[in-house]
Image (tube, rainbow, N blue to C red):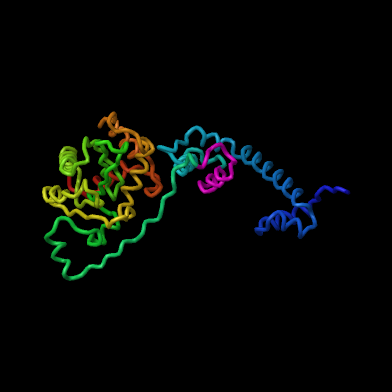
Amino acid sequence: MNYKQLDERKKAQIDILLEDGNSMREVGRKLNISHSTISRYKRQVYKKREIDIKKKYEHFIKYLYQNYDWKCKGIEVCVHQYKKYHPNKVSVSYQQVYNWINEGKIDIRAQDTCYKRRKRKKATNGMMEHLKWNMKNKTVLPIRLRPKKLEKREEMGHLEIDLIIGKRNEYPAIISIVDRCTRVVKLVKAESKYSYHIDKKILDYIKEHDIVVKSITVDNGLEFQSLGKVGKKLGVKIYKCDPYCSFQRGTNEKLNGIVRRFIPKGKSLYTVEQQYLEDISFKINSIPRKMFDFKTPFAIEYNQLLNGAVEI
C-alpha cells in the first residue's frame, strides 16, 4: 500500500470539516483518508497549539500559577488583576482560561476551580387583599410576602440566616448571617441546634456587633421555629422560605459553599473556635467579587455607610 503525506490542501480541508462538527470517521470518508491519519494529524496540531500557547502567554500563565487560590482568589480575579498591573503584557479573557483548563492545556484542574454561579429563580408574589393584615401585624411571614423592592439589594440590613452542620449527630453548628446587599458574612459558633439557643446566639451577636437589621430571611428548619421572638425584639419582619426552595436564599447558600472550602462537610465542629470563624469570615469578606466590579464586600459595606445609606 502506498502512503502519502498530507499536503497543505488536505490539511485545510480537514480543519474546515472538523470545525463544522464532523467526526474524524466522517471526514475520512469524505476525503478518502483513514480516520487514524486524521487522528494523528489532529494530535500534532493541538500539541503544537499547546506549545505555542505556553510560549506566547508564558508570563500570564506563570502569574496564574503563582496567584491563583481556589479558596480566596479565583480565575476571574487573577485575570482582572493581571490586566490591571501588567497592561503591556499579552493576556486572555477569563473564559479562555476556563477553556484551557477544560482542555487540559494548563496545570490547573477543573475540579480545583470555584463552582460556577447558578441562576436564581424568580419568586412569584401573589399579594392579595386579605394578606395585607398579616403584612402589617405579624412578625413571621412567608417569603412571597417579602416586598419586591428588596430584590434590588440597594440597602443594607436585609439579612439571610442559615445553619451550617458539621459531623452527623453532633450538637455544635455554625450560624451564618449574610447581608443581601453587601454580601458581608458573619459566622457564629453555636453549641446546640436547639431553637431557643440559636435565637439567643443570633440576638446577642447582632446587638454586640451593632449589625444593621431591617429584615431576616430563613428556611423552615426546626432551629428557626421560634425566631419570631427575635424579630419582635429587633422590630423587624422574619420571612420564611418555601419548603425545598433553597434558591430563595441564594445569597446564603452561595456563601455557605465558600465557607465549606475552609470547613468541609463531615468535619467535626467541636474543635472549631469562634476566633477561627472570625478569621474565615474576614478572608471571605476580603475576596474581590465580580458582581461588585472586583471590589470586596468590606469595600461595598464601607461605601454604603459612607454614602449615608444606613443610619449609624
Q: Please, is residue 248 above or below residue 264 in the view?
A: below
Is 93 magenta? The answer is yes
Q: Is residue 89 left or right of residue 190?
A: right
Q: Is residue 261 left or right of residue 5?
A: left
Q: In percent of the image, x 59 and y 39: which residue is there?
A: 57
Instruction: Pick whichever, 88 or 32, lies toward us.
Output: 32
Is 174 magenta? The answer is no
Q: In percent of the image, x 22 and y 41: which residue is there?
A: 193
Residue farthest right in this picture: 2
Q: Position of residue 194 (x, y in %)?
A: 19, 41
Q: Position of residue 126 (x, y in %)?
A: 25, 68
Q: Please, is residue 97 above or below residue 271 in the view?
A: below
Residues drawn in magenta:
91-110
Residue farthest front in this picture: 169
Residue farthest top in this picture: 271
The mark total stands at: 0
Instruction: Pick whichever, 60 or 157, lies toward us.
Output: 157
Q: Position of residue 68 (x, y in %)?
A: 47, 36
Instruction: Pick whichever, 133 or 151, lies toward us.
Output: 133
**Image quadrant for the C terminus?**
top left
Q: Position of residue 36 (x, y in %)?
A: 75, 48
Q: In percent of the image, x 62 and y 41: which residue is there?
A: 53
Q: Is residue 186 left or right of residue 235?
A: right
Instruction: Pick whichever, 174 or 185, lies toward us.
Output: 174
